Image: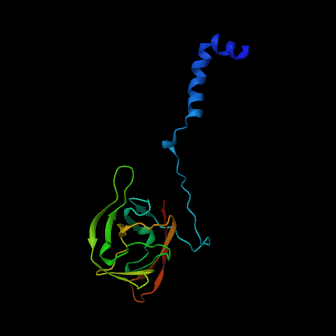
Amino acid sequence: MPSKFKKLFIFHPLKLLVCLPLLITLIYPNESNKVRAGIEFQWNNDSDYRRLRWYQRDNLRRARNTIYFFLRPSDRKTGLLKITMKVPDKFKSSVNEKKISVCQVRIGGFENRTKCLKDLPADIEINEDKTSIDIFPLSPIPSSRESYAVVFKVINPNKTGLYQFHSFGQASGKIPVSNYLGSWTIMID
């Protein structure tokens, strides 16, 4: 051992106590405190893109998952007679009419969990290749202050990645026209 190194730690034990925690963290990094970046990619970067909020219980591949696709009051300008969801082609999952529902929802946060408050009866149709879902609520979804959600209970796909769901709503009124509501981008790890 060089003499300067001996002098540093033998004659100054206080310096050893200060440097020891730093050396331990460099040698044994703590892997459990990983920081997840909150980055969202969007494919369509024009001004017509609208990002909608969503929540999922589990984002691991092949896990049982409950996904809430929120329709907040700011997302709906009028009542909705029909909601059409475009499912990504690569989203190979167990999408089934029986496991899709529409409900009035309380969006969770710091103090509360996301929870369905009242189920809305709806007819649900899925096309043959499972890329489009049409939801017809028996009574129109009102343009009130409550938030609503389309709830999927699925098994996540085997492939990881970002999946973008697009939504279109047919407004109630004199002329029922379908328009773009927004898009949800979910991530599977």
> What percent of the width, then of the height, locates residue 4?
73, 15
Residue drawn at the location 46% of the way across and 84% of the way down: 178
Q: Which is nearer the eye, 181 or 9?
A: 9
Residue drawn at the location 41% of the way across and 72% of the way down: 93
Q: Is residue 61 above or below residue 33?
A: below
Q: Is residue 107 above or below residue 44?
A: above
Q: Which is nearer the eye, 151 or 138?
A: 151
> What percent of the width, then of the height, locates residue 98?
29, 76
> What percent of the width, then of the height, locates residue 165?
48, 73
Q: Residue furthest front?
A: 1
Quadrant position of residue 141: bottom left
> What percent of the width, then of the height, locates residue 101?
32, 73
Instruction: Specify whether residue 71 is in view.
Output: no
Q: Which is nearer the eye, 67 or 189?
A: 189
Quadrant position of residue 45: bottom right
With 115 as the anchor, is 26 left or right in this view? right
Q: Which is nearer the eye, 46 or 27?
A: 27
Residue drawn at the location 45% of the way across and 73% of the way down: 92
Quadrant position of residue 42: bottom right
Colour scheme employed for the rendering of this structure: rainbow
Q: Residue furthest top?
A: 11
